[in-house]
Image: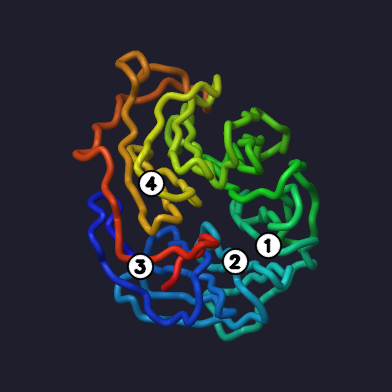
Amino acid sequence: MLRNGDTGDWIGTFEGHKGAVWSSCLDTNALRAASGSADFSAKIWDALTGNELHSFEHKHIVRACAFSEDTHMLLTGGVEKILRIYDMNRPDAAPRELDKTPGSVRTVAWLHSDQSILSSCSDMGGVRLWDVRSGKIVQTLETKAPVTSAEVSQDGRFITTADGSSVKFWDANHFGLVKSYDMSCTVESASLEPKSGSKFITGGEDMWVHVYDFFTGEEIACNKGHHGPVHCVRFAPVGESYASGSEDGTIRIWPLNPANADDAEAPTANGKPKAAAVAAANEVARKIEGFHITKEGQTEA
């Protein structure tokens, strides 16, 4: 389902999957959408018309999918323990397969101008860095618990991960651990504010959406409203708001308000002063309904 990120208004529904949808994404230009499903397929959709453009058949559940930054490739992974790269200019061609992953794939992401890939497994800890050219793992970012969320910052400098009750920030170029914060409950997802990098959000088993200071780990805000575990949180591209998706069958959009006027001049994670504060959204939270999340957390088309 596609909705307006500002208003929550329904735009359209992509119909065609015959199983729960585990992952979905838009390309850089928001012209195409991709989805990975329990029906053993990944599909490409025209984001303007809703038409299905192509279906890539797999041999098991597809848990994750991601468009490359240049929009020419689609990366998929899932229970097969295989990462596949599909050429969007030749969708009928056989995909390229990387070396087999050590476990069932939970998350995937591109970085380094599509020269590298990140993946995590649902049955073991760590985030694996793949070299696209060789198709092999070149480094592993070690974690104690399986990584349920991995995000590359908009400027390409940080990798944000959630594993167990821990949120970690890694240097995306040298892969050292920059910061690590222990949370009070199991965290399913975390996201770094894309413009200033001074805040991050988390969602998890306590059903709340938390806002923290990136530099100190101090909690800034706590948003209550969901009635089930929060499985995904993400900032809007310019950071003025963020969304949370929950097992209660809703998505909520929350405004990001600076705590005070001095916050607008606070130093950022990029070492630059923050620009003027972004205007707050008209509503504190807007609930988006019309889709269903099963008990295991996967959305159904």
Q: Write down the quadrant of residue 15 in the picture.
A: bottom left
Query: Tag 2 or tag 3, which sits nearer the N-term?
Result: 3
| Residue that badge 3 annotates | 1
Q: Residue at horizontal 51%, vertical 62%? A: 295
Query: Tag 3 or tag 4, which sits nearer the N-term?
Result: 3
| Residue that badge 2 annotates | 63
Q: Secondary structure at mark 2?
A: strand
Q: Indicate whether 138 appears above or below 165.
A: below
| Residue that badge 4 annotates | 226
Three-letter code for the amino acid on which mark 2 is drawn: Arg
Mark 4 and mark 2 residues within 8 Å of each other at the beta carbon: no
Q: Position of residue 214 (x, y in %)?
A: 52, 26
Q: Secondary structure at mark 3?
A: loop
Q: Residue at horizontal 42%, vertical 82%? A: 16
| Residue that badge 1 annotates | 105
Label 2 CA crowd tier, 10 Å (few <14, some 14–19, many 20+):
many
Which quadrant is home to the C terminus? bottom left
